[in-house]
Image: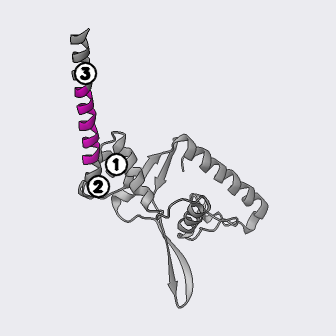
Amino acid sequence: MDFKQNCISIKYTVTQYTHEGKRYIDGKPRTKNKSSMRTLPMIPPLRDKLLAIQEWREEWRQLCGKSYNNEYLDFVYVDEMGDRIKPDYITHAFERMLQKHGLRKIRFHDLRHSCASLLLANGVSMKDIQDWLGHSTFKTTADTYAHLSFDSKLASANALNVGTAFAKLSQGVSEIG
């Protein structure tokens, strides 16, 4: 997180596995592929949330003193002692939040698709969406979201059709008047 440049970098992968009945959290300073390693801008609501997390973390760091784990200061989510949170924590917390608010159950990962859909619907290019999502190839993005592109073309065509109907109606009104 770089609050001076207002950006957040994705450059690390945390996984969880079980070995001989014991659960482990493992981290690697790399991502799934080169394009997954990226830096994205922080929009104001994200910046505010991350600053609140930093403030909370600093309070715990002061409270715990030497017992606090300073190894993961560059991570977004750590627990009160500074240790990495289990990778599936967000998934389970998201499920509980949906249930609490009576919302339809979806996977946390599905938010990537919602993000891509919203970006596409707002005129963001498929190439920019590829960069935002960290897909390794344009083809992956295009194959996954091409139907959305067609839907927005259909919406545009319908808008043109409405415009044509309005023009005909206007012409008819001017002929009457």
Residue 133 in which image quadrant: bottom left
- What number is the disc on residue 141? 2
Q: Position of residue 8 (x, y in %)?
A: 50, 50
- What number is the disc on residue 41? none
Within-10-Å neighbours for mark 3: few <14, some 14–19, many 20+? few
Q: Mark 3 points at which residue?
A: 169
Residue 123 in which image quadrant: top left
Q: What stretch is highlighted in magenta?
A: 150-165
Mark 3 and mark 1: Cα distance apart in space: 39 Å
Q: Viewed as shown, does residue 60 lie left or right of 168? A: right
Q: Nearer the viewer, mark 3 or mark 1?
A: 3
Q: Nearer the viewer, mark 3 or mark 2?
A: 3
Q: Is mark 1 on a helix, strand or loop?
A: helix
**Magenta stretch contains residue 66:** no
Amino acid carrying mark 1 in the image = Ile
Please say whether residue 3 is visible from this viewpoint: no
Reading the chain from its start, which is encountered first: label 3 or label 2?
2
> What is the magenta segment's predominant secondary structure?
helix
Reading the chain from its start, which is encountered first: label 3 or label 1?
1
